[in-house]
Amino acid sequence: MHITQGLRRAVRVNGQGIATIDGERRTTWQEFGDQVARLAGALISLGLKPEDRVAMLALNSDRHLAYYFATIWAGGIFVPLNTRLAPPELGKILTNAGAAILVVDDALQPQLAEILKHISTPQHIIFAGDGDPPVDLIPHDTFLASAEPAPDANRGGDDVAIIIYTGGTTGLPKGVMLTHNNAVSNALSSLAIMYDGEPWTYLHTAPMFHIADNQWNTGITIQAGTHVFTQRFVPAEMLQLISRHQITHTALVPTMINMLCQVPGVENYDVSSLRKINFGGSSIAPTVIRRAREVFPNCQFIQGYGQTETSPNVSMLLDKYNTDEGPYAGKIESAGQPVFAMEVRIVDFDDQELPPGSVGEITTRGPHVMRGYWNQPEETAVALRGGWMHTGDVGYVDEDGFIFIVDRLKDMIISGGENVYSTEVEHVIYQHTAVAECAVIGIPHEKWGETVHAIVLPKRDAVLTEEEIMNHCRRHIAGYKCPRSVEIRHDPMPMSGAGKILKKVLRAPYWAEQDRQIS
């Protein structure tokens, strides 16, 4: 399989259809295909060779998509960079990747001088912004206008196409090598479940450097749909874009869905075109999904479970299971069943398979699983031991094959010998009507090792107390699971580039002076 096959098909079957909408700029599939071929030729003219890395440091845009396809068309490997990282962190990643070319936009260009202090590469830097290009960078428009179209390099199969660096929430970022087979297989298995017969108009809301959105570069192109871009997630602006462009599909994390539901006057926006939201990245409280169904009445909510290392989809939960009643009840808190061609098994600490209903580490294998970590063979061997991808997630599989995520291994709290799963406590806290956001972490305790600590952000104009949250939890879960302390927070939670709450940051002050460290 080849990623570029999907682009060639889109040009053939929908050449005059709209491929991209970025502000006032629109391109057809015919125009976009020509742009990709010429951009590939321009990259080759700079000396790009097969397997060379092209790194992109930019917000969501049509040019981000163009460089993705052009790099792969030219035979290179595309490396999207997390725009929220600091210059020293970006310098480490660029050095590790050995990027030959760096593409940067207006928003990130001011960081460039500081980033370059930490690296010896790349050899060339392209400015892909809309503003005036700095004198020492190659301007995108000139670069493209002078280029000759290149033929498709026709790399495919197990050739590496993309390297995505993990968010670093559990340690230093690792470069996940995803192949053509990974990307296309993931797209096809997702569309086999979600495609409804008409090409989508898809809003790139989550950052394009993250696998949650990056997967749809291929998934939307394969069906010759329309890519629409927004640079940043601003809830009210997103609602406006849905109305303006009649968006049919998007991908979000639960935090984003929760924020959309809390926009003042949300009921006044026309969101009737929205047919499906694919969400994942963390578990979602049942109270949030119920509210989201009220806000987006024509929309199906499809939960996807996976990670960067699995391209990302391991399983999906169909919308019909988002209910507490009827024949589909009882699965609303699951992550669904494995997608086509993926297998899942639960193992203990000795990697022995556990029976249905037993809690252990979730492992998976199939065509979505990465080739490995870039330049990290030891890490690769650990993650892929025994031919299975070890996800680091704790969960179980029921008798029907539905996967239930209990927690991240690193987010599990061990208090007095009892395992407390932070997501279970968070789901209870979210049931309180005055809670906008929450996170549960373990903090050090001399006697118990760890105790449960909740950080709670109240809704606008709501008043919450520590005692109120603790009493609420006592009414719903066992005492040992209840928070022993609560922080009522009014500042936003620290977030990763993918919109996940950074528990590592929340834990850091509590564990800074401890001999035992929890990342």
Image (cartoon, rainbow, N blue to C red):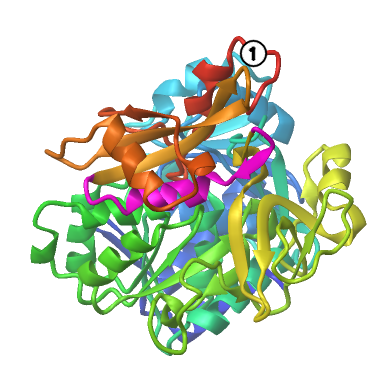
Check the image and report above or below for 309 versus 492.
below
Residue at position x 47%, y 83% in the image = 195
Residue at position x 42%, y 82% in the image = 320
- How packed mark 1 is, by other alpha carbons closer than 10 Å (few <14, some 14-19, many 20 or more), is few
Q: Is residue 229 left or right of residue 395?
A: left
Check the image and report above or below for 121 versus 97.
above
- Asked where in the image residue 249 lies, by quadrant, the reply is bottom left
Q: Position of residue 116 (x, y in %)?
A: 57, 19
Residue at position x 69%, y 70% in the image = 2
Q: Position of residue 476 (x, y in %)?
A: 40, 53
Q: Is residue 326 left or right of residue 392?
A: left
Q: Amino acid at mark 1?
A: Gln
Looking at the rendered image, the quarter that the C terminus falls into is top right
Look at the numbered disc 1 and give the secondary structure of its residue: loop
Query: Does 289 appear in magenta?
Result: no
Q: Position of residue 469 (x, y in %)?
A: 32, 39
Q: How many marks?
A: 1
In terms of depth relative to the viewer, which is nearer, 238 or 13?
Answer: 238
Looking at the rendered image, the quarter that the N terminus falls into is bottom right
Query: Does 423 appear in magenta?
Result: yes
Tell me, yes or no, if residue 149 can be seen here.
no
In terms of depth relative to the viewer, which is nearer, 205 or 455?
Answer: 455
Q: Position of residue 119 (x, y in %)?
A: 65, 20
Check the image and report above or below for 331 versus 368.
below
Magenta residues?
A: 416-434
In terms of depth relative to the viewer, which is nearer, 489 or 209?
Answer: 489
In terms of depth relative to the viewer, which is nearer, 1 or 382?
Answer: 382
Residue at position x 78%, y 41% in the image = 374
Tell me, yes or no, if residue 452 can be seen here.
yes
Task: Report which residue position mark 1 lands on.
Answer: 514
